[in-house]
Image (tube, helix red, strand yellow):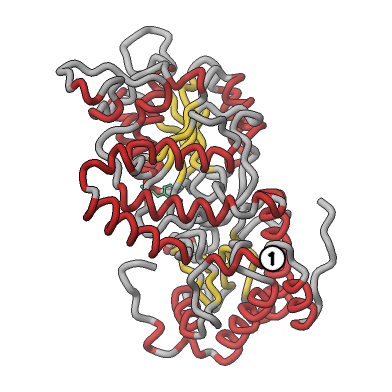
Amino acid sequence: MNTPTLPSSRDDCLARDAADPLQPLRAQFDIAEGLIYLDGNSLGVAPRATAARVQQVLRDEWARDLIRSWNTAGWMDLPARIGNKIGRLIGAAPGECLVADSTSLNLYKVLSAALGLAGAAGAAAGARRVIVSERSNFPTDLYIAQSLAKQHGCTLQLVDDAAELPGLLAGLAGRLAVLMLTQVNYRSGARHDMAALGAAAHAAGGLVIWDLAHSAGAIEVDLHRDGADFAVGCGYKYLNGGPGAPAFVWAHPRHAQGFWQPLSGWLGHAAPFRFSPDYQPAPGIARYLCGTPPILSLAALECGVDTVLAAEPLGGMAAVRAKSVALSELFITLAEARCGALGVRLASPREAALRGSQVSLSLAPPLHEAGYAVMQALIARQVIGDFRAGDPARLHAVPHLLRFGFTPLYIGHTQVWDAVHQLQQVLAGGEWRDARFQQQAAVT
Ligand SMILES: *Cc1c(COP(=O)(O)O)cnc(C)c1O
């Protein structure tokens, strides 16, 4: 990749931000002046439009128009309408992507469907019964896979290092049911090669499911080009849909009809308002709906997705990605230059092409246990990232991480500069040792 020169002073950063074509997008967000929010990979910032839109749904569509709004306000169309908008960010054609339920539930649906297509859901001889993922995948993905493996008598095989995947997949030819991965790792920000791994899974006779929780709205994704079979993703991270926002689900059109997903609720029926006692799945992705969609949450999610689509006339996801890379490179360079001697180590891939939109840092001994307190001290200085615990027994291999997400819609170069300055202050002064930063809250 052609890396532009990095700004070398705070004034350089200010100039870079002033010339940034994406800079106007920040005004879309309701974010306190002076707050440096580097946690959009966990919970995106509230769009300004959301409060008014949700108010309108409450007041006009619900309170005034009541049940008529299912038709008159287009409530029934929201899952497909917002799904189509998200589809534009991930290379899905209209009608292929749907908003429904949570990422966990959608994983359950698509993994069930993929196992069904592999024959693993039945007792047939020759069925493919191995699910492959990686140990560092997000826990809910692994838990859902464990549950379905148990239910269908499949095995779940996990790799510790993504480099093992091609060899493992080749060795499972004829036995692989599904390769199920999160494209961008929630801990390290490391990004898989979707096309190469998809091809390897297909060569072994399996299907591939991608969790796009840290991809959608963060990096360019092209599910068709890169040979995906199924995908799911999250509405409240880079899509700014609000806490617990509904998630999305995509199936390649050649699979969408191939199998009944197991959560066969009435709204995934071909004709819900016929109230038939017998389930007949709706054609295509619509069968991935289960129950009544959460309209207030969908209204908020649509505002969030619109903040990302607002980048389309400004260069779209290519421009968002280019700025994300620039911000991440600046962060890494500054963090190593200014905080390296204080114990900070890069815990994400160094090469931009191998990362998503997040950079993780770890702390070298003797600070290797101090990550949580350091992050708390940083948050007290108005720089919000988050902390992900490592494996206490093997901190050298799975270290505690300080995570920093770079959402180019509302983060600029100057904030990156200032964030590293604050980190340096926290470490150099030892203020993280203060007792108030040691108290672990329930949510880190
Ligand atoms: C955030 C995230 C989820 C969240 O799942 P929920 O069902 O919304 O709680 C799932 N998978 C990955 C990879 C995530 O990063």
Q: Is residue 399 above or below residue 126?
A: below
Q: Is 68 located above or below residue 130 in the figure?
A: below
User: Residue drawn at (72%, 69%), measured in percent from left and top?
Assistant: 330
Location of the C terminus (image quadrant): bottom left
Residue 320, position in %: x, y? Answer: 67, 55
Q: Position of residue 366 (x, y in %)?
A: 55, 78
Residue 312 or 178: which is nearer the viewer?
312
Task: Identify which amino acid the numbered label 1 is placed on.
Answer: Leu
Question: Residue 7 is drawn in which quadrant?
Answer: bottom right
Q: Is residue 402 above or below residue 9?
A: above
Front in this rendered view, residue 11 or 397: 11
Where, by quadrant of the figure, is residue 188 drawn?
bottom right
Identify which residue is drawn at 37% across, 87% down.
436
Drawn side of residue 202 relative to residue 265, left or right: right
From the viewer's side, name the closer residue of 247 and 359.
Answer: 247
The picture places residue 351, in percent across and down from the top left corner, at 73, 54
Q: Is residue 260 left or right of residue 210?
A: left
Task: Quickly name the residue at label 1.
Answer: 327
